Image: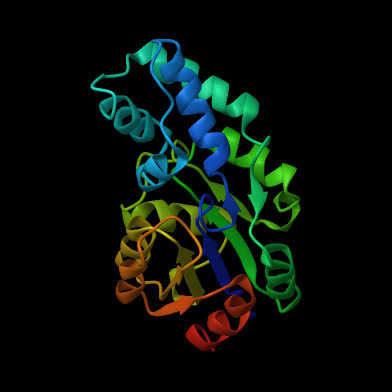
Amino acid sequence: MQPMAKCLVLDLDGTITDSLPDIAGALNRSLARYSQDPLPMEQVRPMVGDGLMVLYQRGYAARGMVPTDEDMALGLADYTAHSTEGTYLYPGALEALRALKAAGWQLAVCTNKPEEPARILLDHVGLLPLLDAVGGGDSFPVKKPDPDHIRFTLEAAGATVAESVMIGDHHNDVAAGKGAGLPTIFASWGYGPREVGAEADAVAESFADVPALCETLRP
């Protein structure tokens, strides 16, 4: 029987792409409908990681407001329409993921971002053809930090927990990975605080570190 391929599960925002300009832009356009001043990107940065709906709740709360269901729906539609304008791949991402693919690894994205804008973004940066699965925040009944979000994503990729590794920049990524039984890599270039690295099994300083770390964690 042929052994199951190894799989790297990746977070998206703050791990593969710097999506903050477009995320903050959509949030601030939503706030502008109520004549609110824009939030600086550095204030929005720690709000990222739990999905767009939670982001809007946090952003509105920073202005003493609560978003309505209509605000959420309009915000998601607006972000989806503009999600590729200022977002870019982190340096070395494409090269590292191509190297892993060439070495026989499967690749899957597990993100709390809704699946439609996630796929649009991944297609825009040229990664979608490399992926075996995309598990968005609305793809399954759960999302990170629930480890089942990773398990369902791996199932969609045809991969197993026993041969997989998780990389992300947020506590939710490390917690979900560990909960699912995966060794975890902290992406130090992302939005999460550096202390999250202490919770992970390894810390990547750049994407160039990722292939070797994956092979070390899953020899």
Image coordinates of residue 9 in percent, x first then y, are: 52, 63
Image coordinates of residue 166 in percent, x first then y, are: 46, 67
Residue at 49%, 34% in the rendered image: 24
Compared with 180, 44 (above or below) is above
Q: Please tell me in which quadrant of the rendered image residue 99 appears.
A: bottom right
Position of 156 compared to 30: left or right?
A: right
- Out of 30 and 113, give the one closest to the viewer: 30
Q: Please tell me in which quadrant of the rendered image residue 16 appears.
A: bottom right
Compared with 47, 57 (above or below) is above
Image coordinates of residue 161 in percent, x first then y, are: 44, 69
- Out of 164 and 76, give the one closest to the viewer: 76
Position of 167 compared to 94: left or right?
A: left
Residue at 23%, 22% in the rendered image: 64
Task: Please identify the quadrant where the N terminus is shown.
Answer: bottom right
Compared with 98, 59 (above or below) is above
Image coordinates of residue 101 in percent, x first then y, are: 71, 70
Position of 85 compared to 52: left or right?
A: right
Task: Please identify the quadrant where the C terminus is shown.
Answer: bottom right
- Out of 209 and 29, give the one closest to the viewer: 29
